[in-house]
Image: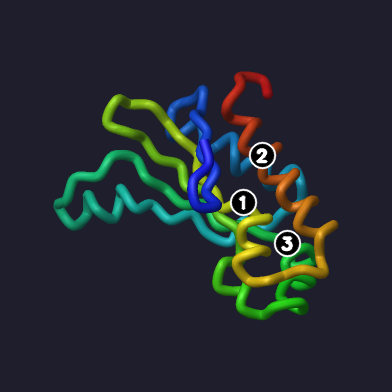
Amino acid sequence: MQSDGRITSRSAFSPTETMGHLEKAIREKGIIIFARIDHSGGAAAAGLPLRFTQLLIFGNPKAGTPLMESRQTIGIDLPLKFLVWQDERGDVWVTYQDPSYLAALHQVTDRADTVAALSAVLDGLAKSVIRPGG
């Protein structure tokens, strides 16, 4: 499912397992994980209800820097992110911004190979949690 540059896929795993699989797959690719933000944990600490919602922020300067050399404004959307969230039925989802959409949004027109490579990596990472063993 894709909407406004966001790609969303249903995970075959629990929310915690999904985050664990994503973190492991990202690290195995040598990509840096900068932060894991627990929105639902923050909500709970404030006494507010929120189903599982966590954000994983990650990137690789060798991939992101060329995009920023082209158009520095893309830095507002870098590093890249995965949002893992659980809906009201208990289904678990992974959402991320399509690098092709971000490149178009920021008018990055001279880094097609980098954008395609990033899109392929994110697609592969997302697919690693939508199919068991995938």
The x, y position of residue 23, in whole percent, is 60, 43
N-terminal-most mark, 1 or 2: 1
Residue of label 2:
125
- Quick one: which residue is furthest to the right in this view? 113
The x, y position of residue 50, in whole percent, is 25, 44
Q: Amino acid at mark 2?
A: Leu
Residue of label 1:
98
Say which of 100 and 44 sits in front: 100
Say which of 129 and 95 sits in front: 95
Q: Quadrant of the C terminus?
A: top right
Which is more foreground, mark 1 or mark 2?
1
In the displayed structure, would residue 7 be above or below residue 32? above
Residue name at image x 37 percent, y 45 percent: 53
N-terminal-most mark, 1 or 3: 3
Q: Amino acid at mark 1?
A: Asp
In the displayed structure, would residue 24 be above or below residue 67? above
Q: Amino acid at mark 3?
A: Asn
Which is more foreground, mark 1 or mark 3?
1
N-terminal-most mark, 2 or 3: 3
Spatial separation of the CA atoms under disc 1 and disc 2: 13 Å
Q: Which mark is residue 76?
A: none
Residue of label 3:
60
Say which of 9 and 58 sits in front: 9
Lateral position of residue 42 relative to residue 125, left or right: left
**Callout 1 environment at 10 Å: few (<14), some (14 to 19), or many (20+)?**
many
